[in-house]
């Protein structure tokens, strides 16, 4: 989730666990600062985006800084700067525990989103994701902010514990809503379906429905409250879903071989590792250059340009080069460097389910 929500969650957890009436009131701001800083720390991996955006997505994001195995190490590192304070030196074990709590709180919230976390890195590269919450959930943020504000004005832990209980009920309800959405959509499909439902922003009643087919995907946007169009008109009731077809090779058979060639390029390996529901975004031909762009359905919204659009471009008979389209732009692109060690790696067929990665223990565990 977003960094502000992580900081709020870490500080509310601190009020719920470490606050007591006997502790001096002057220590509370320091405790909250320690836990809040630690809760924000794992997102430091975003710096990797400025080094290499694709390696950031495929290898670096939510890896080392989100690992349960490395969490004790990071907690110790984060505790050290606070040792300038006499209170921190006196309560060094509490400072370490607060840092561990803050880091763990971010890991827990990020586990709820669809991206996935490498919980046991570096021993395992497996990704774990529950996938019931959108990366920005205003209800979670408002609930935590209200709990923190009210809790600071009332001694004891009751307010914080009550807020965390409400948060748990809300997050649990998202699992129930997803199960209900899956059931009502499956009942309306004529054949056995391979359905995945992904959370959407603004409302826990909005879901992206992905039905995997032999030729690609069928995609629709569901509102559990609407009969036809919801307040955001792209989302519709279960009886009036507007399905669209998406696929990796597109709908034009004449270009399928070209698109497959671009997809199979060794330099495109990292995007293939990253994407769970890869689709063709568009095919550009301008003058003597051809560009084939792909995206991932996990990060497509019906009213926004997809955040992650990567592709291969070549001029006439020259080799393919790796690019990304910058966020919120139509054609503004960035040339990306590629790992020369991948130059001889051959990709499988684009419709193959077999993984091409050679990482140890790299199976993913998606609960959506």
Image (spheres, helix red, strand yellow):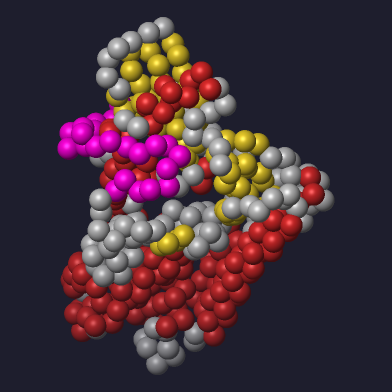
Magenta-highlighted stretch: main secondary structure? loop
Pinpoint residue 137: horizontal percent, then vertical percent: 56, 57
Q: Is residue 324 visible?
A: no
User: Going by the image, does 138 lie left or right of 308?
Assistant: right
Q: Is residue 99 visible?
A: yes
Near-viewer residue (44 or 227): 227
Near-viewer residue (78 or 149): 78
Residue at 24% from the left image edge and 83% from the top image edge: 93
Name above or below for residue 248 compared with residue 237: above
Pinpoint residue 328: horizontal percent, then vertical percent: 49, 32
Pinpoint residue 172: horizontal percent, then vertical percent: 59, 71
Instruction: Name, please, the residue furthest toward the top.
Output: 287
Name above or below for residue 247 compared with residue 76: above
Pinpoint residue 315: horizontal percent, then vertical percent: 33, 13
User: Going by the image, does 213 lie left or right of 81?
Assistant: right
- Count numbered badges in the picture: 0
Name above or below for residue 104 compared with residue 364: below
* Residue 319 on the magenta span: no
Residue at 63% from the left image edge and 61% from the top image edge: 178
Near-viewer residue (228 or 43): 228
* Residue 346 on the magenta span: yes
Residue at 73% from the left image edge and 49% from the top image edge: 190
Which segment did they paint magenta?
335-357
| Image quadrant in which you'd find residue 317 | top left
User: Going by the image, does 112 lie left or right of 179?
Assistant: left
Instruction: Name, please, the residue furthest toward the bottom.
Output: 22
Near-viewer residue (291 or 72): 291
């Amino acid at each position: 989730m977003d960094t502000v929500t992580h900081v709020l969650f870490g500080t509310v957890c601190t009020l719920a666990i470490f606050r007591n009436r006997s502790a001096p009131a002057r220590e509370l701001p320091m405790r909250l600062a320690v836990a809040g800083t630690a809760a924000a720390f794992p997102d430091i991996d975003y710096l990797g985006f400025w080094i290499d955006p694709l390696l950031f997505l495929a290898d670096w994001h939510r890896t080392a800084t989100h690992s349960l195995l490395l969490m004790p190490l990071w907690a110790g590192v984060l505790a050290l700067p606070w040792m300038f304070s006499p209170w921190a030196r006196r309560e060094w074990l509490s400072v370490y525990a607060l840092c561990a709590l803050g880091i763990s709180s971010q890991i827990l919230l990020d586990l709820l989103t669809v991206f996935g976390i490498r919980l046991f890195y570096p021993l395992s590269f497996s990704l774990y994701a529950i996938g019931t919450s959108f990366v920005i959930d205003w209800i979670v943020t408002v609930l935590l902010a209200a709990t923190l504000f009210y809790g600071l004005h009332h001694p004891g832990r009751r307010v914080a514990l009550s807020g965390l209980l409400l948060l748990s009920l809300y997050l649990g309800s998202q699992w129930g809503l997803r199960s209900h959405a899956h059931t009502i959509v499956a009942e309306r499909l004529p054949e056995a379906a391979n359905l995945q439902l992904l959370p959407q922003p603004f409302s826990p009643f909005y879901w992206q429905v992905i039905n995997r087919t032999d030729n690609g995907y069928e995609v629709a946007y569901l509102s559990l409250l609407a009969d036809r169009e919801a307040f955001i008109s792209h989302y519709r009731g279960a009886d009036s879903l507007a399905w669209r077809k998406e696929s990796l090779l597109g709908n034009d058979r004449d270009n399928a071989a070209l698109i497959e060639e671009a997809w199979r390029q060794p330099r495109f390996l990292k995007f293939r590792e990253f994407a769970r529901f890869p689709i063709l975004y568009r095919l550009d031909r301008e003058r003597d250059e051809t560009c084939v762009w792909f995206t991932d359905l996990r990060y497509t919204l019906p009213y926004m340009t997809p955040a992650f659009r990567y592709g291969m471009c070549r001029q006439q008979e020259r080799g393919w080069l790796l690019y990304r389209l910058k966020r919120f732009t139509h054609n503004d692109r960035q040339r990306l460097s590629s790992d020369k060690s991948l130059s001889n790696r051959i990709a499988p067929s684009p419709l193959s389910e077999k993984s091409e990665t050679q990482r140890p223990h790299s199976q993913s565990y998606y609960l959506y």
